[in-house]
Image: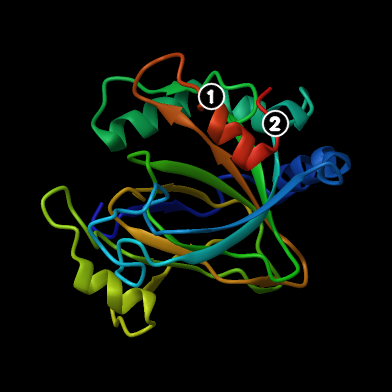
Amino acid sequence: MKDGAVVLDGFMRPDAVQQVISNVEPSMKDAFYCSNEHNVYLINDDPDFDNEHPRNRKVYSDKGIVAYDQIPAENLLHQVYGWQALKDFIAQLMGSPEIFPYTDPLGSVNININNDGRQLGWHYDNSKFVTTLMLQPASDGGVYEYVPWLRSEEDQNFDGLDKVLKGKSDEVQILKQEAGSFVLFMGKYTAHRVTPSHGDPRLVAVLSYGPEPGKTLTKETRQLFYGRTQ
C-alpha cells in the first residue's frame, strides 16, 4: 500500500448507491452537526510545545453525522457492512487473520455530511485504518487531500507537518473518488483533510472495523460526534 490508500471504483453500482441515499434521506434532517477546533492528533495539546508548534496548532472541522441507529434496518449499508467477503478482503489487505465490525450503537456505521462550506481539517486518525464508501461527491470542493506516510512511530516529522499546515508542502496528493467508490485508508500515519464542500453535499459512509470483536466508542467520543451517548 505504497500511497496509504486502496480505492475500488465501482464497488457499488449507481442504482444501489441511489437506493442507499434515498432510504437514509429522511434521517438526514436529524443529523447531528458539530464543529470544533483541534490539533492534527485529535488529542489534548502537549504542554512541552507552544500553541503554534505543529503538535498543538489548531485547525477547524465541521460536519453533520447520521448515526448507526438512524440508518434504517433495510438499508443496503447494513448488508455491505456484514458482508463476509468484504471483511476477508480487508483482513487480507491489513495482514490480519480476521477483522470484526464494531458493536457501537452509534458509530459502527455512520454517514458524514459536508455541505455549506463544511470541511475536515488536517488530522491523523487514531485507528490504524478507516474504510469508507463514497455515496455522493460534493458538486464543488470537498476534495480529499493527503500526505502519505508523513509520520511514523519513530519520527513525528514536525518539519514536514509544519509545511503541510502552512500550505507549503509539495507532497500533498488528491484521493479521487466517485459515487460508489470503496476506500481503505491508512490514516494513522498519513495526514489528510477534506476541503470545504459547496453545492450538492458530500456524503460518505464510514464503516468501522477492528482486530477484535466487541469494539465500541467511548461515551466522550459519542457525545462529541453524535451529541448523545446512546
Question: Residue 177, image x and y in percent?
Answer: 53, 61
Q: Residue at x 29, y 53 (%)?
A: 46
Residue indicated by mark 1: 83
Question: Residue 151, image x and y in percent?
Answer: 21, 58
Closest to the camera, between mark 1 and mark 2, is 2
Residue indicated by mark 2: 228
Q: Mark 1 near mark 2, Cβ–Cβ under 8 Å?
A: no
Q: Relative to 213, is 61 above or below?
A: below
| Label 1 residue SS | loop
Q: Residue at x 83, y 38 (%)?
A: 23
Instruction: Give the quarter of the image for residue 16.
Output: top right
Q: Residues within 10 Å of mark 1 (few under 14, many from 20)?
A: few
Instruction: Give the quarter of the image for residue 5.
Output: bottom left
Work out whether residue 36 or residue 215 is closer to the camera in this orientation and state it.
36
Looking at the rendered structure, the number of numbered marks drawn on it comes to 2
Work out whether residue 159 or residue 177 is closer to the camera in this orientation and state it.
159
